[in-house]
Image: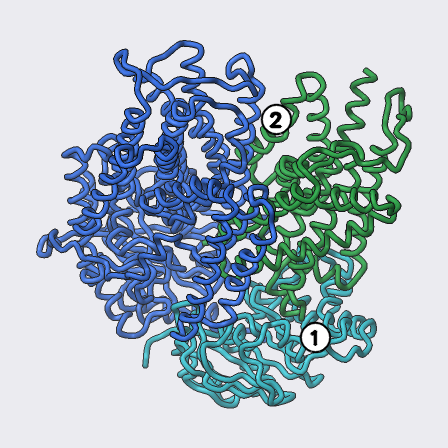
Chain colours: A blue, B green, C cyan
Amino acid sequence: MNRKTLIAAVLGLALLAAAPLLTSNPYYVHMIGTIMIYAILLYGLDIVVGYTGQVSLGHSGLFGVGSYTAGVLFLKLGAPLWLIIPASIVVTAGFGALLALPALRVTGPYLAMVTLAFGTIIQILINEMNFLTEGPLGIKIPKPSIAGHKLSEHEFYWLTFALMVLSLVVVHRILKSQLGRAFEALRGSPVASDCMGVSVYRYKVYAFVISAGFAGLAGCLYAYSEQYISPNTYNFELTVLFLLAVIMGGRKTRSGALLGAAIIVILPKLLDDLEMFRVVASGLAVLMFIGAVVGIAKKMTTPKAMAIPVVGTIALAGFSFWLQSITDWRLSIFGLMILFVVYYLQDGIVGFARSLFARKSNADTRIASVSGKDAVMVAAHAGAGETGTDLLVATGVLMQFGGLKAINQVDLRIKRGTIHGLIGPNGSGKSTMMNVLTGIYVPTAGSIEFAGSSVVGRTSSDIALSGIARTFQNVQLFGEMTALQNIQVGLHHTFNSNFVDVSLHTPRFNREESAATERGLGLLDFVGLGDLAFEEARNLPYGKQRLLEIARALALDPQLLLLDEPAAGLTAPDIKELVAIIRKIRDHGITVILIEHHMDVVMQLCDTVSVLDFGQKIAEGKPAEVQANEKVIEAYLGGTVA
Amino acid sequence: MEILLQLIYSGIALGMIYAVIAFGYQLTFQTSDTLNFGQGDALMLGAMVGLTLVNMGVNYWLMLPLVIVFGLVQGGFVERIGVRPAIKIKSEFGWIMSTIALGIIFKNVAENIWGRDDLKFPSPLPESPIKLFGANILPMEILVVVGAVLMMLAVEFFNRKTIYGKAVVATFNDRDAAKLMGINTGLVITFSYALSSATAGFAGALIAPLTLTGATMGSVLGLKAFAVAIIGGLTSGMGIIVGGIILGVAETTTGFYISTGYKDVPGLVLLLLVLAFKPAGLFGKSAIKKV
Amino acid sequence: MLSIKNLEAGYGKVQVLHGISMEVPKGKVVTLIGSNGAGKTTTMRAVSGMIKPTSGEISLHGKRVDGLESYAIAKQGLAHSPEGRRVFATMTVTDNLILGAFPRLTGSRPKGDVPGDLERAMDLFPRLKERRNQLAGTLSGGEQQMLAMARAVMLNPEIVLLDEPSMGLAPILVEEVFRIIGDLKARGVTMLLVEQFAAAALKVADYGYVLENGRISVHGEASKLRDDPAVKAAYLGGGH
């Protein structure tokens, strides 16, 4: 965070803290308090929605769990504040873990449905379990006491403020650490995450648990703030409001969460006041019209694209004059807002504002990359073995999909320190073999031994951590993260810091984080991308993206590197660079399996070449031998067909 | 024992409604890899529009095809406004949120037009139960089962016997190849949304006389029908009928033997369990990941 | 019949075709050969509308078709038997064939005699005749390839695009496929054939283009290309 943003943030927070002193109206104090409480929940929700990229329709349920933990503990046990707060967090986090279980293997709309079902079940349970929750009657909770002194409205406000700032700092630290990068990787490419050692299952659970913890804290504070809780608060509409807040405010930003919270708290109140709404709607229509005219004049957009928003806002303003009361149409307004944000404001208000004042990403050049000292560390795993010994032995591998034998009894022996080529016509089974070696497919039969232990049946993330790294035929980078961050995901295995270390920025974490940055920059230098460290991966030219993928794979300190058509789509100069880099990699002692169609690349680099055709190995040997082999020529050119 | 049988009959009728809604989910998912989170609200609108027509004096049997037409239009609208733009920008988040948003808007509009209270839908058939194998069954329940089965058979017939139906099935199978055949797959997707809302609306008009009809009737129904669609693996027609019946019976028995407050729970728990253990559904085929 | 000028196309950031030009005259069989990744399938997809070209012109019968949706191009009389066959697996062989005639049955192309053409297609592809009511997904690879080709022919097309018909097929079936291509040629069907297996393709074609890294490296009469060492080099590298 740079200086200007930091100052602005501190000022803003100071203003927020001073609010009770600036206004004498308790109504406003309570309202701002509610905004902060919602913000706490939204910081957590952003982890799931903004970072891992999933839709969660269950957070109102988690919010309810937090509130009711507080309520029940107070009602049944008369528990004190210092017990209730952590209890709310822990219990809700537990529910978050419970929610993560069915959510593990699903994604997208299925995940959304799972969270919705979960939230609905919670609401039903709260409503029905009278013996615990008093059911529809609700629970009354007075303001809490600290050391016998009952907190006044203002004092409670400052407690809320303190907890909100604490949450802000913790969430910020988590998201800027290796945990945050892991979460983003999940959205960028789940397959690549697994193959870089970041287990999608595990981090999905973490994301849900952490966001649930914050929801629990928010729920607990909400109970005290409202002094009365009942089941019908924690319904579908609230969950949709939370989502609206995150996407409208702006995902992946803390200020967006605060802004979103403010919008969803203030908006209903705004909508209760029809006069106010008419003014706002008219103002909005005028603004939109002006904005559209300016945009069209500046050629930033077309009349066709602006037609809907302009007509829509004018219609809304007209509608507001026709109506007698707007309260009943609240939900429709929210629905329309969601539609608007989804299609026109994908990065939210904060995101949009940022893009208007787009600054080039500031390079944090204080940490110099360690050139000279080579960042590519070979797995200095004990027993690294000598060149020429067997590193990977695959015997009788069979991969069958229904009736199709994609790999049919293939034996492969990869010797340490060599570059082993794997070639063959389309559909011969090369990529399937890659996927089998990295655990994406489990072979139907056969054995695969890597450095002494079997690979078959292990998860991709496990295999990656044991020393096999890969690149992908279709580039699988984490698009929204910078080049350096992509590599740092590959370096995830170097982190032993946990949630506590990250939140507190312990020496261990600081050490590991700067080591990762240093090493990451070094790896980028190795592939010649040093000066692009802070560019978003999706903005890099295609050739450089391929190199970045290789650097990322190297971050795993692999003994074996699998390259899947690394030269595909590259121009001649790029290919030259690629060949030089692959040689460098081999010179560091890393064994390479290379799938390629560019024969000249294969000829230049490989020590041995295996040829597959129809899932079977038809030839193997030195490149020149294979090139002249009749069976190979026939397989490629189809020589003897009638 | 009689009571159990009665519960089973009611459960089957309820289950068929779930199956019809689930059928709608399958339709749109197969043609476009998207679904309508507001499917339950489409059912509710069908019931409400049907109620209005019936109160205006339209004969129940005439009302049904009118509700179907309304559903076709409503579904087409959802696709145009909510789904098509999202498919264009390839945003899954987009169509999830926009179909949710449209569902909310429809529900709110319904609340404002018809009020928030539940209304009674006049039953076109006599309300006194008939005895079947010793237990009571309402004539309306029989109508629901017959209506649902007829609707699904009609769609099957359309798919198998008409060239346009075949075009829809081709789009299910392989969208790109279908386009090569000269099939306008965008239109097919719009049509599948229209059809899925039409079947949901029809289901709504069928079940309305049996339950309380109100603006909120769709929400949880839609969610539970999704569970049924998942059990059917989003590809198998038989699967959703079986799943629907299982769920319907589980609900009526829970509602009676445990408590009505808990009656929604089996469906929701079923959804969670199926997605946790067999996401491809009990009848579906698991997809092979391609990297 | 089909004219391609300076076609450039690719996927997202990757540009695969760097300006290729080809002609397919009426009644002739033209083949486009080259190694994997050279851009053959990309060319086919750009022609049939599955992907939009970034620049260049594609004309069918003098009418521009680049940039159109694939269903619109199909209605102009271009049939594409795609890479990987892509038959409609849950439908019968007969239904697959009927769908090939979709534009004829829905008014976008002259109707002609669809049932008659169906029978004639069955005669041309005897294996399909035996299996007319079988689900397409249960056919073997070779049979699916026949089905894809027959389906394309059912359009009564002006031109047929055949994309890698031999892919994944055992040699015996590849023979049969090429024999059928020869039959179609004898009936005067205009074809653009993309093939990985240069030898077979050049035997059946009249004219050939060799694609290397997104550019045409060599082209000429098929009989002459067969012995050209540049062809072998394009596939197996070495020597240029």
In the image, is B202 to the left or to the right of A548? right
List the residue tagged with mark 2.
Answer: B265
Q: Secondary structure beneath disc 2?
A: helix
Q: Say if B8 sits above or below A196 in the image.
A: above
Q: What element carries label 1?
A: helix
State the count of labels: 2
Tell me which amino acid carries mark 2: Val
Q: Name the residue at 88% across, 29% down.
A: B127
Relative horizontal placement of residue A374, taking residue A33 as reference (left or right): left
Density class for disc 1 (Cα within 10 Å; few <14, some 14-19, many ≥20) is many
Q: Mark 1 lies on which chain?
A: C
Q: Give whichever of A584, B141 is nearer the camera.
A: B141
**Residue designated by label 1:** C153
Q: Which of A280 and A237 is in front in this view?
A: A280
Q: Quadrant of residue B160?
A: bottom right
Report if the CB atoms under discs 1 and 2 are less than 8 Å apart: no
Measuring 34% from the left and 52% from the top, which residue is drawn there?
A350
* Residue A580 locus on image (x, y percent): 21, 65
Q: Can residue C87 be seen in this view?
A: yes
Q: In which quarter of the image is residue A150?
A: top left
Q: Residue furthest left?
A: A372
Q: Would you call the spot at circle 2 few (<14 residues within 10 Å), some (14-19), or many (20 or more)?
A: many
Give me the C-alpha separation between circle 1 and circle 2: 55 Å
Residue A640 seen: no
Q: Do the residues at pointers 1 and 2 share their chain? A: no
Q: Which mark is residue A267?
A: none
Taking B280 as reference, is A547 above or below it?
Answer: below
Q: Which of B78 and A390 is in front in this view?
A: B78
At 72% from the left and 73% from the top, the residue drawn is C103
